[in-house]
Image (cartoon, rainbow, N blue to C red):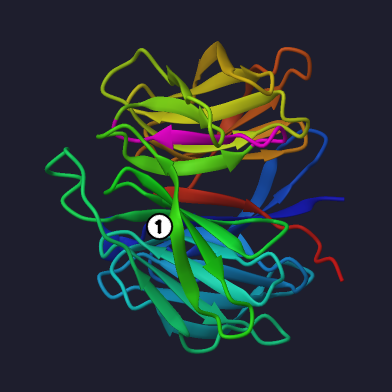
């Protein structure tokens, strides 16, 4: 059966050409995306997330006065608006659901804060219950003049939430109280080298945190009490790495490179990452990557297309599939999973 894939974008309020949240159907065998259509007209839904046990899709609206929107997902993929809540910050760029499904977390990029919203039994967000203001800066004057929350990453097995702060060169460890919804700052899980610009991270099966530095163009790996390792994600310059993701068995890690317009493939042995290939995305400014089965999907923001690759299961290297899907200013690709529970 075809699978549902939702795509976010920048709309005209952010200088983009998209129209809102779009829906496509994915053929698991061929990887093809078909039937592309706009299913929700909402301003600049730049990042999407799904509730783990309810058919609800969330989107940040990346605006000066940020909001987060929730939609009910029907069997055919049509969306019904459920709620819109202000995030209390500027330019929200990432959203995630707490591991127990009780709260929604949003990273406000420009204002450097994390908003928390309670979720009712149906996954609908209520008014904001907390706003954690970050602090700090870095040496890159035009990018690190203050905190810039870029990702919220809940622990899948507990209350901790990691927050990538591009502005302070920190990945903060925070702790969510599941009753009050208050988010407490515990301390720095990673103190990156000055000027790194932590953007997104990945939890490896071996317990390491793999971090993409947007300002240095590096992939680094971190474990408590150990010296971190690192490698550049592309020799092409300038480079602003975007998303990081991994294959199903964790042996290969993929990083999108904006500027070189490539995807870098790293072999991950549980201890370190080794570059094995760098492949053209077939587009301009790869903002987001998503893996589904044996296929890799790349949202090329500036060339307004989504390109599709088939991954060799042995080498991990993606090969382009002919053709691409046209979409205005794509920024996020979210495969919709059937809710559990």
- Dot 1 falls on a residue whose secondary structure is loop
Left or right of 174, for residue 24: right
Residue 212 belongs to the span the image colors magenta: yes
Question: Of 170 and 288, which appears nearest the observer?
Answer: 170
Q: Position of residue 237 (x, y in %)?
A: 28, 18
Q: Position of residue 341 (x, y in %)?
A: 87, 71
Q: Is residue 111 visible?
A: yes
- Total numbered labels placed on residues in the image: 1
Question: Of 296 and 89, which appears nearest the observer?
Answer: 89
Q: Measured along the vertical axis of the image, is residue 267 above or below residue 341?
A: above
Dot 1 crowding, Cα within 10 Å, few <14, some 14–19, many 20+ = many
**Which residue appears farthest toward the left when viewing the image?**
141
What's the residue at 36%, 21% (across, down)?
260
**Which residue appears farthest toward the front when viewing the image?**
225
Q: Position of residue 55 (x, y in %)?
A: 74, 72
Q: Measured along the vertical axis of the image, is residue 61 above or below residue 18?
A: below
Residue wearing tag 1:
18
Question: Of 178 and 107, which appears nearest the observer?
Answer: 178
Left or right of 228, for residue 35: right
What's the residue at 56%, 71% (across, down)?
176
Task: Tell me which corner region of the image, top left, top right, bottom left or bottom right, holds residue 239.
Answer: top left
What's the residue at 47%, 31% (across, down)?
256
Left or right of 98, for residue 187: left
Left or right of 195, for residue 205: right
Q: Which residues are magenta?
A: 204-215
Q: Position of residue 291 (x, y in %)?
A: 67, 38
Question: Of 176 and 68, which appears nearest the observer?
Answer: 176
Residue 154 belongs to the span the image colors magenta: no
Q: Is residue 297 visible?
A: no
């Amino acid at each position: 059966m075809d699978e549902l894939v939702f795509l976010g974008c920048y709309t005209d309020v952010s200088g983009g050409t998209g129209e809102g949240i779009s829906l496509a159907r994915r053929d698991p065998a061929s990887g093809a995306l078909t039937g592309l259509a706009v299913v929700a007209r909402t301003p600049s839904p730049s990042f999407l997330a799904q509730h783990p046990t309810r058919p609800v899709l969330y989107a940040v609206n990346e605006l000066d006065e940020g909001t987060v929107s929730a939609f009910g997902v029907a069997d055919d993929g049509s969306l019904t608006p459920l709620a819109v809540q202000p995030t209390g910050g500027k330019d929200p760029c990432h959203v995630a659901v707490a591991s127990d499904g009780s709260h929604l977390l949003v990273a406000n990029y420009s204002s450097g804060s994390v908003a928390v919203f309670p979720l009712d039994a149906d996954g609908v967000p209520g008014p904001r219950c907390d706003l954690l203001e970050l602090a700090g800066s870095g040496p890159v004057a035009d990018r690190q003049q203050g905190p810039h929350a870029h990702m919220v990453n809940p622990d899948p097995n507990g209350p901790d939430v990691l927050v990538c702060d591009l502005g302070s060169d920190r990945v903060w460890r925070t702790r969510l109280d599941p009753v009050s919804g208050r988010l407490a700052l515990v301390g720095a899980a990673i103190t990156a080298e000055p000027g790194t610009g932590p953007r997104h991270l990945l939890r490896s099966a071996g317990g390491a945190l793999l971090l993409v530095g947007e300002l240095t163009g590096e992939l680094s790996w971190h474990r408590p009490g150990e010296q971190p390792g690192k490698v550049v994600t592309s020799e092409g310059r300038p480079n602003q790495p975007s998303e990081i993701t991994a294959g199903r068995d964790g042996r290969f890690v993929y990083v999108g490179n904006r500027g070189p317009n490539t995807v870098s493939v790293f072999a991950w042995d549980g201890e370190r990452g080794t570059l094995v290939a760098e492949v053209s995305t077939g587009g301009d400014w790869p903002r987001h990557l998503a893996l589904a089965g044996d296929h890799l999907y790349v949202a090329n923001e500036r060339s307004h297309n989504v390109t599709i690759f088939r991954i060799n299961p042995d080498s991990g290297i993606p090969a382009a599939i002919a053709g691409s899907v046209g979409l205005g200013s794509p920024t996020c690709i979210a495969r919709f999973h059937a809710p559990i529970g």
